[in-house]
Image (tube, rainbow, N blue to C red):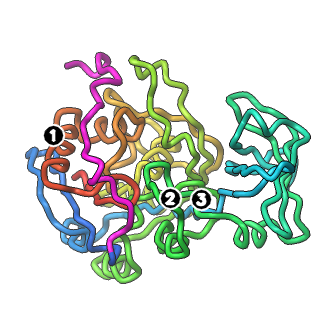
Amino acid sequence: MRDDTYHTSDFEFELPAEQIAQYPVERRDRSRLMLVDRASGELIHRHFSDLPEFVRPGDAIVLNETRVFPARLVGRRASGAPAEIFLLHPSAEGGERTWTALVRPGSKLRPGRRVEIGEELAVEILDALPGGERLVRLETPLDVERALERYGEVPLPPYVRRAATERDRERYQTVYARERGSVAAPTAGLHFTPELLAQLEALGAQLVRLTLHVGVGTFRPVETEDPAEHPMHREWYRVTAEAAASLNATRERGGAIWAVGTTSVRTLETVADEAGRVRGGEGWTGIFIRPGYRFRAVDRMVTNFHLPRSTLLMLVSAFAGYELAMEAYRTAVGDGYRFYSYGDSMAIL
């Protein structure tokens, strides 16, 4: 099949509900790891703690150090009925207290309405935006970050069918998360421990950090049968000049660049030129990587197992090759791998 003839239905697969991970494994690095060898087509079954066996001295491991913030605010309307505000990102013009958000119930939360979240936090609906979003203002005497930490909930993905707990505040976050801004975790990084990162550095690999703030669009399936007609979501990224220089030096000395997660892949491919040279910078990326795409900046990839009909599965299929990627998914289903955010991992070599 030619790359330009793939349809969205080609990225469908059946997954038993019991394989959708509802909780993380006890130890981050004890999740299962499927290694996908593009050269041989072999699928190797290991644990994530074995990853350093496949990394060479001189390689670079690219980590997205975005931090998930407590974006879900649950409160009550003036009538006493429940309401939910899901913060997406601060408004470009309104300062740190004015945000773009999703609201529920949308029909009731029109401009001028107010939702009481807690004693020191309320949300006023300012305006209705395209796509069902709202412009809202946080009303609090507290610093915004402190207010969200006190009253917000961890924004677990919709397929995690339980309430968030205090433990999720730690586990739905990478150990290297630093810059607040994501409404979903870059889940490929959830498997790393400080000890594993230290082990990678000790063997001669370099840890390179960038930022891409994950948006809610990452969970939206492709609804159009022709993927090219899908309106791709945009996410904000930053690559420092130092990170770009490190990656270019890795490439020059013959090391491999490992992208941890689809977010790191999207960022690197956004800032790389045709020769694969990475430039520092920041901005918004709407890059849609699917079969037929020619990768320029990424040699290896660490990722989780993604939703059917998703842009993330299409990206993985572009990197591994469609047939091999779908074979890996069929094998993962048959072998009882755990799927999605709290699930197991794949490394594509």
Is residue 224 visible to us here?
yes
Specify the quadrant of the image occupied by residue 346: bottom left
Q: Tell me where residue 148 appears, x and y as whole percent.
A: 73, 66
Q: Main secondary structure of the magenta part?
A: loop
Q: Residues within 10 Å of mark 3 (few under 14, many from 20)?
A: some
Specify the quadrant of the image occupied by residue 100: top right
Q: Residues within 10 Å of mark 2 (few under 14, many from 20)?
A: many
Q: Nearer the viewer, mark 3 or mark 2?
A: 2
Residue linked to disc 1: 327
Q: Tell me where residue 344 appears, x and y as whole percent.
A: 29, 60
Q: Amino acid at mark 3?
A: Thr
Distance (Cα) linking label 3 and label 2: 21 Å
Judged left or right of residue 129, residue 47 is left
Q: Tell me: residue 299, above or below residue 52.
A: above
Give the residue drawn at x 77%, y 72%: 146
Judged left or right of residue 260, residue 18 is left
Q: Amino acid at mark 1?
A: Glu
Q: Earlier in the sequence, mark 3 or mark 2?
A: 2
Name the disc covering residue 240, or none. Answer: 3
Magenta range = 1-25
Q: Amino acid at mark 2?
A: Ala
Q: Earlier in the sequence, mark 2 or mark 1?
A: 2
Q: Residues within 10 Å of mark 1 (few under 14, many from 20)?
A: some
Judged left or right of residue 156, residue 81 is right
Give the residue drawn at x 16%, y 66%: 46
